[in-house]
Amino acid sequence: MDTINLALDQHPIRFTPDGKVAVMDAIRALSDLTDSGRIWHSLSQTHPEIISLCDTYHFIHTEPTPVADSEVWDTIQGLLFDYLVEESLSDAEQV
C-alpha cells in the first residue's frame, strides 16, 4: 500500500499507509511556520512523553520521521496550540 499525500494551504502532509500522520508535516501546516523541527524539539523537550507515543516511518527519499495515529496527534495538537499561544504572547510582550 502506498503512502498518502495531502496539502493544507500549500503545505504537504504525508500519511503512512495505515493512516498515521507525519508529525513535522502537520506541525508545519498548522503553524504556517517552516521551522517545524524547532517546534517539535521544544514540544518534545517540554513533554518528553510524546516521543514514546509516536512511531517512526521511513517515507521514500527522506529521513525517518515521527508519525502519530489520531489519538496521539490529538495530544500533540493540543500541546502545539498551547505552544503557539505562548510564543505569540511572548512576541507581543517584546513589542
Image: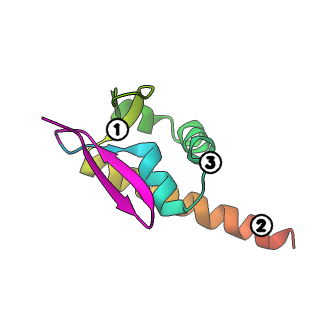
| Span of residues in magenta | 1-18
Kindly report the distance in space between the C-alpha atoms of the residues bearing marks 1 and 2.
30 Å
Kindly report the distance in space between the C-alpha atoms of the residues bearing marks 3 and 2.
16 Å
Q: Secondary structure at mark 2?
A: helix
Q: Amino acid at mark 3?
A: Asp
In this view, the mark in front (1 or 3)? 3
Of the image marks 1 and 3, the number of the one nearer the N terminus: 3
CB within 8 Å, label 1 to label 3: no
Of the image marks 1 and 2, the number of the one nearer the N terminus: 1
Quarter-of-image position of residue 74: bottom left
Point 26% across, 43% down: residue: 20
Image disc number at residue 67: 1
- Left/right of residue 33 with respect to residue 54 in the rendered view: right
- Left/right of residue 32 with respect to residue 93 in the rendered view: left
Q: Nearer the viewer, residue 23 or 44?
A: 23
Task: Tell me where residue 30 appears, x and y as whole percent.
Answer: 47, 62
Asked if the magenta segment contains residue 26, the reply would be: no
Point 34% across, 35% down: residue: 53
- Left/right of residue 50 with respect to residue 60 in the rendered view: right
Q: Amino acid at mark 1?
A: Val
Image disc number at residue 91: 2
Quarter-of-image position of residue 83: bottom right
Point 47% across, 44% down: residue: 24
Does residue 94 sit above or below 83 in this rendering?
Answer: below
In this view, the mark in front (1 or 2)? 1
Of the image marks 3 and 2, the number of the one nearer the N terminus: 3
Q: Classify the position of the N terminus by image quarter.
A: top left
Q: Secondary structure at mark 3?
A: loop
Does residue 77 sit above or below 4 in this rendering?
Answer: below
- Residue that numbered label 3 is attached to: 35
